[in-house]
Amino acid sequence: MVQSKAKTVDEYVRSLPADRREAVSAVRRTILKNLPEGFEEMMLWGMIVYGIPLQRFPDTYNKQPLGIAALASQKNYMSVYLMSVYSDKKTLAWFTKAYKASGKKLDMGKSCVRFRKLEDLPLDVIGVAIAKVTPEQLIAVHERWRGKKNGKAKPK
């Protein structure tokens, strides 16, 4: 995975080749337009991350902000990471169906949707996927997961 040393999101975007800068900027605008209140844009792990700031929720398993999405330019493609799609089977089923209905070919790992050019990505579907999870829902999923991992199943 290619990781940028950029300290800010703007610095990261400026460092990209023109074609990727345009594509990443368009996806970024879609994410920001649909991002529920309470999430913030930040640089983590050498990519643009959308997550809950530690000031709001510091009790994470890795002492890093809980992320809902990320955006990165890799060596051979660009990626949008959708943790809400990865962490919920219903959302994954909706996403794959909506992506297919867009007429575009889905190239996806666990949470990573890969694309080589902006036209490969249905921005409307990405926007809806971003809007589906609030910070409160992400925190609840995280706490349930941690409870199960520690042998303490939490009520749903």
Image (cartoon, helix red, strand yellow):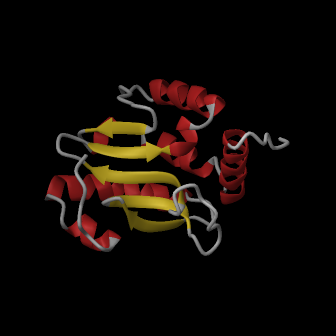
Quarter holding residue 12:
bottom left
Which residue is drawn at the image coordinates 57% and 70% (left, top)? 54
In the image, taking residue 103 as reference, residue 64 lies left or right, namely right
In the image, taking residue 122 as reference, residue 14 lies left or right, namely left
Residue 67 against residue 7 in the figure, above or below = above
Which residue is drawn at the image coordinates 66% and 49% (left, top)? 142
Residue 153 against residue 30 in the figure, above or below = above
Which residue is drawn at the image coordinates 57% and 55% (left, top)? 61
Rendering coords of residue 145 (x, y %): 67, 43
Q: Residue furthest front?
A: 151
Rendering coords of residue 152 (x, y %): 78, 42
How many labels were placed on the picture? Answer: 0
Q: Residue furthest left?
A: 17
Rendering coords of residue 93 (x, y %): 59, 26
Which residue is drawn at the image coordinates 24% and 61% (left, top)? 4
Quarter holding residue 44:
bottom left
Rendering coords of residue 8 (x, y %): 32, 73
In the image, taking residue 134 as reference, residue 82 lies left or right, namely left
Q: Residue furthest right?
A: 155
Give the camera-side residue of 113 and 26.
Answer: 113
Residue 15 against residue 105 in the figure, above or below = below
- Quadrant (top left/top right/bottom left/bottom right) for the C terminus: top right
In the image, taking residue 43 as reference, residue 145 lies left or right, namely right
